[in-house]
Image (tube, rainbow, N blue to C red):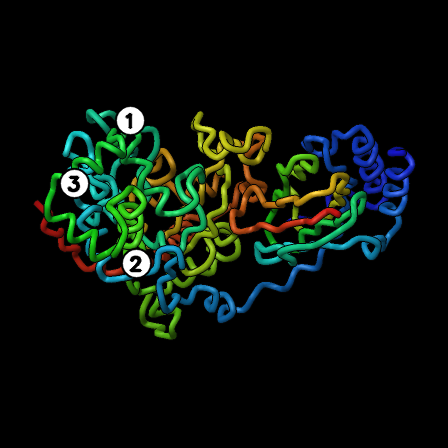
Amino acid sequence: MSNPRNGPSALLGTAVATAALGLFGFAGTSLGSAIVGETRYLGVEQKAAASLDAMKAQYRRPTSIPFPKENPYTPEKLSLGKKLYFDTRISVSSAQSCASCHSPAFGWADGLPVGVGFGMAQLGRHSPTIVNAAWGAIFMWDGRLANLEEQALGPIQSPGEMNMPIDQLMARLNTIPEYKPLFATAFPGEPMSPKTLAKAIATYERTVVSQRAPFDDWIDGNEKAISEEAKRGFALFNTKAQCSSCHEGWNFTNDGFQDIGLPSDDVGRGKYAPGVVKMQHAFKTPGLREIVHRSPYMHDGSLKTLEQVVDHYDQGGLNRPSRSDLMKPLGLTSQEKADLVAFLKTLTSDLSPTAVPVMPR
Amino acid sequence: MRLPSLTIVVFMGLSVGALAANLTITQKGRAFSSEEVTIKKGETLTFLNDDSVPHNIMSTSAGNEFNLGSQSPGSSTDVTFKEPGEVVVICAIHPRMKMIVKVQ
């Protein structure tokens, strides 16, 4: 937790210095058009640590999947979207589908440090899971796509990935007779188009949800559902280890962009926020459901085990200006680290096997 | 003239309890306290971080750009809006945080 960094007389000096900078329009890293005034440190009263019950209440599972009003759920869209998601003919090589990198076999990712694309070339970043994507606020590690409909068309057209120009894809789908009635019932009165293709895929993806895990049973009051180590781990997660600052809520993320000090040249979100110091090397916080099935970890797949992940946070990461203020050495004991890993393992549900659909011919 | 009005802002800010002078936007729970506010050209908003995590409030709206950088919990910074128009204010870190400042 932070304290005001200065005593009263130093505060006055800081305030004057910052205000003086403001006169010349250089306060903070402002572009200078609005006038940023001085910063006051007020030490806003922090509540006493929440009771365990209050903490647990923040992790209750939602009761339904949110579908956007621009693309509401229908069983026909779901069925079409699932076929498209598993259809390798979406790629120019006819060898890769969405499921190739976002596979039910690997926690809806691919189990690799970084993805594999066109011509078996290694991509730059770890394939994210699509589990619980329906609740995402923004997509891609660097947040460059706003919603699942936009995201569905990205890898299809990306030369490094499926390398399939969208017009060529629509032409190919038009040569597969069984797709026509599927599109017609899913989108009555609309022609087959990239827009309806993306809406179908997004609808399917929204139904990929992590099922009840032992953690959820514990949240709902079953004290036998998880071990004492895991319960201690949950408490640490929300207090000393500060994980819940970013990995908050039932899906364990607020989708925030943070630099956690990994030694990688990738500037992540910083590419889209040049000049914003805290966005350089910042990546979107992933959720933690099914985390055991989603190794290796981080945007570059550089950490193989959950133990390594906990060690990274305990150590604090590279101390550079862009690093999140929340990152710092934690001083965890080896028991505490083990407790955290035990807790993370309770987030794995018995995901029922996914039946791969028969492809339209 | 720009200089005297900035001086006024500085002196108001230095006195304890000057918060009452400006409309204050808070951020608890990773959310802005208002989705939309309307102010007059030259008026000031106070962005107060009463949350438990740092925020990075900024805008790229033409004429009213600003970037507060990492704002720690318990700190507050004033921003004066000079240009009329609609200013989209976001937190660079938390993509759900967005509000509109209508400068008249």
The crowd level at tag 2 (other Cα within 10 Å; few <14, some 14-19, many 20+) is some
Quadrant of res A155: top left
Chain bearing mark 1 = A
Quadrant of res B31: bottom right
Badge 2 element: loop
Badge 3 element: helix
Q: Tell me which amino acid carries mark 1.
A: Pro
The crowd level at tag 1 (other Cα within 10 Å; few <14, some 14-19, many 20+) is some
Q: Earlier in the sequence, mark 1 or mark 3?
A: 1
Alpha carbon of mark 2 to alpha carbon of mark 1: how far? 31 Å
Alpha carbon of mark 2 to alpha carbon of mark 3: how far? 34 Å
Alpha carbon of mark 1 to alpha carbon of mark 3: how far? 22 Å
Quadrant of res A265: top left
Residue A81 location in percent, x, y? 23, 51
Q: Can the viewer see residue A32 in this picture?
A: yes
Against A264, residue A12 (above or below) is below
Against A341, residue A322 (above or below) is above
Q: Which residue is mark 1?
A: A159
Q: Tell me which amino acid carries mark 2.
A: Ser
Q: Which residue is mark 2?
A: A210
Q: Which residue is mark 3?
A: A174
Residue at figure coordinates x 70%, y 38% from the top left: B64
